[in-house]
Amino acid sequence: MNGQTLHLRGLTRRFGDKVAVDHVSADIPAGQMVGIIGRSGAGKSTLLRMINRLQAPSSGQILYGTTDVTALSGKALRDWRTACAMIFQQFNLIPRLDVLTNVLVGRLNHRGTFASLLGRFTAAERAMALAALDRFDLLETALVRAGQISGGQQQRVAICRALLQQPQLLLADEPIASLDPRNAQVVMDALRRINREDGLTVLCNLHHLDTARHYCDRIIAMQDGRFMFDGTPAELTAEKVREVYGVTEDEFHSAPSGSLAAA
């Protein structure tokens, strides 16, 4: 899948008098894995939701290659949300439906919604879904209700669902915030595998510095809606961490999990 560069140009989002994202700009080449970090309320989730167009920017521009994402509407906007898949901290699965059907929901934008909801998926689509589940060691859960599997498994199911959209970008909004360390590692391994093997651009909001450093090619740190740092993991020095979080790195690691950085 041939992706293109994502361009953010002066992107801003206001909620009344509050500026959640404040005139940010960046170029994100195809195939990069980017970790976005920052304190609670820094604007991380709002940024991803604007890129996916779940929220409209107050000003500024989003370009994907030469496509003006900020100008899309109707079918073109739906197509963009298909190409720019998103996974969430809360998984957003349908607990009463089996895992296989939850994954097949990723095909909704590729066919008639009514037919899909009736379960009229093609044999090829079912094969795609089963292959995705097998790829991430979930095949044995295919006929189990989504509400009956573990949180780590549910997040991997959500990733499989996103992959069935056949996206070019994958946005992950705090995908491991509610998971224990073991499941968090499994989910991050899955995201990096997708990035490396499929060449998908991955933007991931994270609240653990070590996770961002370990998995990401590039780290963007946000503070008060602005980009305070944009560079490689090696360039994220202890001094930069102190500027972003207002504490030393040792103090950051000793704080209660997520108290400084959760979105």
Image (spheres, rainbow, N blue to C red):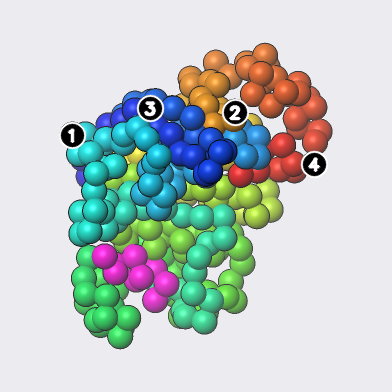
The reply to whether discs 4 and 3 touch (Cβ–Cβ < 8 Å) is: no
Which numbered marker is on residue 66? 1
Q: Which residue range is magenta in the image?
A: 101-109
Residue 178 is situated, as x and y percent measured from the top left of the image, at: 65, 55
Q: Residues within 10 Å of mark 3 (few under 14, many from 20)?
A: some
| Distance from the alpha carbon under mark 4 to that under mark 1 | 43 Å
Residue placed at 55% from the left, 50% from the top?
175
Residue 237 is situated, as x and y percent measured from the top left of the image, at: 63, 16
Q: Residues within 10 Å of mark 1 (few under 14, many from 20)?
A: few
- Closest to the camera, between mark 4 and mark 2, is 2
> Depth check: 192 or 43 in front?
43
Q: Which residue is mark 4?
A: 256
Residue 156 seen anywhere in this rendered image of the structure: yes
| Distance from the alpha carbon under mark 4 to that under mark 3 | 34 Å
Residue 50 is situated, as x and y percent measured from the top left of the image, at: 41, 44
Q: Which residue is mark 3?
A: 10
